[in-house]
Image (cartoon, coloured by chain):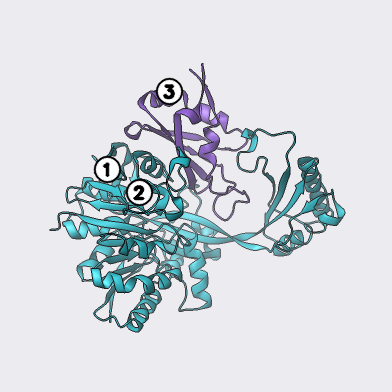
Chain colours: A purple, B cyan
Amino acid sequence: MKIRLIDIAHGRSGDKGDAANVGIIAYDDNGYEIIEKHLTAERVKKHFEGICFGKVERFEMPNIRALNFLLHNTLGGGGTVSLKHDAQGKTLAAALLRMEIEV
Amino acid sequence: MKEKIRIASGQGFWGDLQSIPLQQVTKGPIDYLMMDFLAEVTMSIMQKQKKRNPSAGYAKDLIQIMKEILPSIMEKNIKVITNGGGANPLACSEEILKCAKKLGIDGLKIAVVTGDNILLNVDGLLSRGIELNNMETGESAKNIQDRLISANIYFGAEPIVEGLKQGAQIVITGRTTDTSLTYAPMIFEFGWSFDDWDKLASGVVAGHILECGAQATGGNFLGDWKMVPDLARVGFPIAEAYPDGEVIITKHDNTGGSVTTQTVSEQLVYEIGDPSNYITPECVADFTTIRLEQQGKDRVRVFGIKGRPATDSYKVSMAYHDGYSAVGTLTYTWPDALEKAKKADEILRTRLSDLGLKFDEIRTEFLGVNACHGPLAQIQNEINEVVLRVGVRGHRAHDIEQFGKEIAPLILTGPPTATGFAGGRPKPSEVVAYWPALIPKKLVKPEVIILEL
């Protein structure tokens, strides 16, 4: 069965220099089990092909059912250097929620 | 010791809703109002303002806000802590004193926290072998030494606590960490020791939740955002803090927005790196130990937080000149909106090249199509309109300016249905790049100055 990440999780994203931080929070324990298993750093890196040009780091926060991803080399230089419309990566959490997962 | 204190967030950034501070001090009981004005590049903007005018260089908005709230904070004995002093906390504080005098207030004490500005010390530090390498790239600061605009230490709660101990009603700081504005009053009121890592970490977490204002109370909420009530009258977060480190996040009654474990969780993951290693000047907080519990409507209990000893460095935020940039936009409509925008981009790039202009980067985005989500965006066949957005960046100001002159001509010399050029030619703006570094704590010391009326 295919599920849409947006149906089981929400999140927020922002900037840390040229890296974007994408926090994904599952709505319930079952949802956290799914993202904990399927939302690997490799999977996220592949999802953001053409957007993220550096490595992806993943951090687990089971206490709030969240995963935090750091997407390096993603914001076109970051801060006022970036020519991107979304220079601070504010929309990247929504972009990750586009993912579909086979469970 | 007080049984609890209520610390309210009044601003989440420089330019936030101006009506909030007055709302926070009048709509219900609070003991402290904290206001965060500083983002990463804000200090460089303020430093430039100060260079042009020695009495400028702080958040001007703060003066208007203080005019509005001074009578209430004096009457109710609410203390105000803010980093709105920016690059010139002393001038900012003197201006606030002037306002207070005009309002007929007396007995006002302001603590000014300075010493964070090390711009004039950077050359000396580098020559003494203090490296100030870029934390992200490892590059030596010597490469940008001659282009520096600002260099500021992120101080923590210690000097703010010192100001409160000296009886200040208002504490105005330069570059301090956003979180310290919230946990300094907890240290002061509850007498927490500076090696009580768990309590300090609890305060840091409360600070992280408050520092972006309404982002904790339903603003920018990506969950079920349509269910957030009355965002037009959104209430900003309030931390109800207890001596043992527990905190309840709430907001005033009869305000919009909502406080749930979901709205608080989203703020907890905002702009963090390794959650188990959230470094502040006073402790390292472990965000993987945070526990949240809904305690009725618009009340979230935050507890269980663990902390570890602080590091021996302060973070330094430096900013330097890195060339110029400009962005131009044009709108194209049906039919073939995207095809026309792409053609216009191609024509523009050919003309820039024929003119021999040199840029470090040219970036084209199609707003309405894929500007934000890039290759992830699903492209519709029949779009009604699209905004072509072209940005250039480089080190030759003249070339950036020439780029600005090439946008409008596309209306008459390119594909049809171009519109939306009311703003005039894009002007070059200076690119200010950010340089994060570390400095040993023993080399710098904050200073607390008391001004009285």
Could you say which is closer to the camera, residue B422 or residue B195?
B422
Measured from the top left, where is residue B54 in percent x and y? 47, 79
State the residue position of label 2.
B209
- Res B212 visible: no
Q: Tell me how far mark 1 sits from mark 2, CA to CA.
A: 10 Å
Say above or below: B37 vs B201.
below
Measured from the top left, where is residue B398 in percent x and y? 73, 64
State the residue position of label 3.
A34
Could you say which is closer to the camera, residue B419 or residue B354?
B419
Which of the chains bears the disc numbered 3? A
Which picture quadrant has residue B395?
bottom right
Q: Are marks 3 and 1 on the same chain?
A: no
What mark, if any, has residue A66 been given in the picture?
none
Query: Which residue is drawn at the image coordinates 79% and 52% (left, top)?
Result: B418
Left or right: A29 as drawn, with respect to A74: left
Which of the chains bears the disc numbered 2? B
- Answer whether labels 1 and 2 touch (C-beta < 8 Å): yes
Measured from the top left, where is residue B242 in percent x and y? 19, 50
- Res B386 visible: yes
State the residue position of label 1.
B302
Badge 1 local density, few (<14 within 10 Å), some, or many (20+)? many
